[in-house]
Image (cartoon, rainbow, N blue to C red):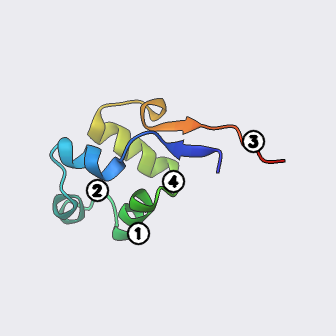
Amino acid sequence: MPISYKIDVISALKSAGYSTYRIRKEKLFGEATLQKFRNGELVSWENISTLCKLLNCQPGDIMEYNEDTEE
């Protein structure tokens, strides 16, 4: 996948004061989305927007494009 996360999203959220319990309790992200973050899978732009708001960052701060080298 050419798009990947530059950071460990769950750890970054915890550092910002958002435990997985708090995230679920405040309904910021669903369990499926948290699991996608854990597995490094891509999520919707709405979730990226929420993540950027919580971490006070830009999408480029958390994601990067890696050109595929396989042919």
Among numbered discs 1 and 4, the one appearing first in the sequence: 1
| Cα–Cα gap, marks 3 and 2 | 36 Å
Q: Give me the disc on residue 43.
A: none
Q: Secondary structure at mark 2?
A: loop
Which of pointers 1 and 4 indicates the residue nearer the eye? 1
Among numbered discs 1 and 3, the one appearing first in the sequence: 1
Residue at x 39%, y 60% (from the top left corner): 38
Q: Is residue 16 above or below residue 36?
A: above
Which of pointers 2 and 1 indicates the residue nearer the eye? 1
Q: Can you identify the residue that label 2 sits on?
A: 28
Q: Can you identify the residue that label 4 sits on?
A: 44
Residue 2, horizontal then vertical, whole percent: 65, 45
Which of pointers 4 and 3 indicates the residue nearer the eye? 3
Q: Give me the disc on residue 69.
A: 3
Q: Is residue 37 above or below residue 59?
A: below
Residue at x 20%, y 59% (from the top left corner): 26
Amino acid type, label 3: Thr
Q: Nearer the viewer, residue 69 or 48?
A: 69
Q: Secondary structure at mark 3?
A: loop
Residue 32, horizontal then vertical, whole percent: 41, 69
Amino acid type, label 2: Leu
| Cα–Cα gap, marks 1 and 4 | 12 Å
Which of pointers 3 and 2 indicates the residue nearer the eye? 3
Amino acid type, label 4: Ser
Residue 68, horizontal then vertical, whole percent: 72, 43
Q: Please tell me how crowded label 4 is: few (under 14), some (14-19), or many (20+) other residues with Cα within 10 Å.
A: few
